[in-house]
Image: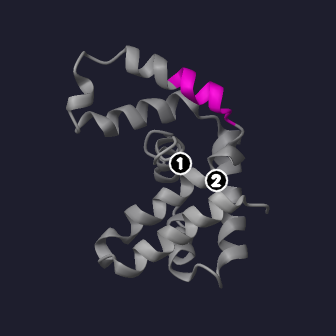
């Protein structure tokens, strides 16, 4: 698997975050790594952004000031972009990432491996890995 220097840097920063994180927050941090692998799903940036625009257009005005809607937006976007093939490709890429970076990023890969051990939910809006990958695929995430 070829990762760009930017992707490697992002994963290394997540590993550093995990060092300082309490145990109950580690999964949340590790799930940010799914955004690095989102391109493996086959969703283009253009398609993702267009779907995001359609989802946002459905929301009430002022939605951005309501943090509780962020999860709803992520779920709706995950549903809109999901196909079985895309979700499977993401899980496969994450599995390869875990295998290849286990020695270099032990805490991150351990947390991802634990999450990958859970079967993917049939509902894409409940598939933790898929929703996280979609949500964390945007720049600045």
Q: Residue 48's spot in the image, x, y percent?
A: 58, 30
Say which of 30 and 75 sits in front. 30
Work out whether 129 lies above or below 9: above
Label 2 Cα crowd, 10 Å radius (few <14 / some 14-19 / many 20+):
many
Label 1 Cα crowd, 10 Å radius (few <14 / some 14-19 / many 20+):
many
Q: Residue 121's spot in the image, x, y percent?
A: 50, 48
Quadrant in the picture for the N terminus:
bottom right
Residue identified by numbered label 1: 133
User: In terms of secondary structure, where does tag 1 sit?
Assistant: helix
Q: Looking at the image, which residue is at 33% across and 40% down? A: 71
Q: Looking at the image, which residue is at 35% across and 79% down? A: 20
Outermost residue on the right side: it is 1
Q: Residue 78's spot in the image, x, y percent?
A: 50, 36
Q: Looking at the image, which residue is at 48% across and 68% down? A: 14
Q: Looking at the image, which residue is at 64% across and 80% down? A: 102
Is 4 left, or right, of 117 in this rendering? Answer: right
Q: Is residue 47 magenta?
A: yes
User: In terms of secondary structure, where does tag 2 sit?
Assistant: helix
Residue identified by numbered label 2: 37
Q: Is residue 77 magenta?
A: no
- Asked if disc 2 and disc 1 are in contact, CB closer than 8 Å, the reply is yes
Q: What span is colored magenta in the figure?
A: 43-51
Q: Residue 52's spot in the image, x, y percent?
A: 48, 25
Query: Residue 61's image quarter?
Result: top left
Work out whether 75 lies above or below 36: above
CA separation in Å, label 2 and label 1:
7 Å
Please tell me which of labels 2 and 1 falls first in the chain. Answer: 2
Q: Main secondary structure of the magenta part?
A: helix
């Amino acid at each position: 698997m070829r990762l760009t220097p930017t992707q490697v840097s992002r994963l290394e920063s997540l590993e550093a975050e995990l060092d300082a994180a309490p145990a109950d927050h580690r999964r949340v941090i590790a799930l940010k790594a799914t955004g690095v692998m989102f391109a493996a799903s086959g969703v283009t940036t253009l398609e993702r952004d267009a779907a995001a625009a359609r989802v946002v257009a459905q929301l009430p005005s002022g939605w951005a000031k309501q943090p509780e809607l962020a999860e709803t937006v992520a779920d709706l976007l995950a549903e809109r972009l999901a196909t079985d093939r895309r979700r499977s490709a993401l899980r496969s890429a994450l599995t390869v990432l875990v295998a290849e970076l286990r020695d270099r990023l032990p805490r991150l890969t351990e947390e991802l491996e634990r999450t990958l051990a859970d079967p993917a939910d049939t509902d894409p809006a409940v598939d933790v890995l898929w929703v996280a990958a979609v949500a964390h695929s945007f720049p600045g995430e």
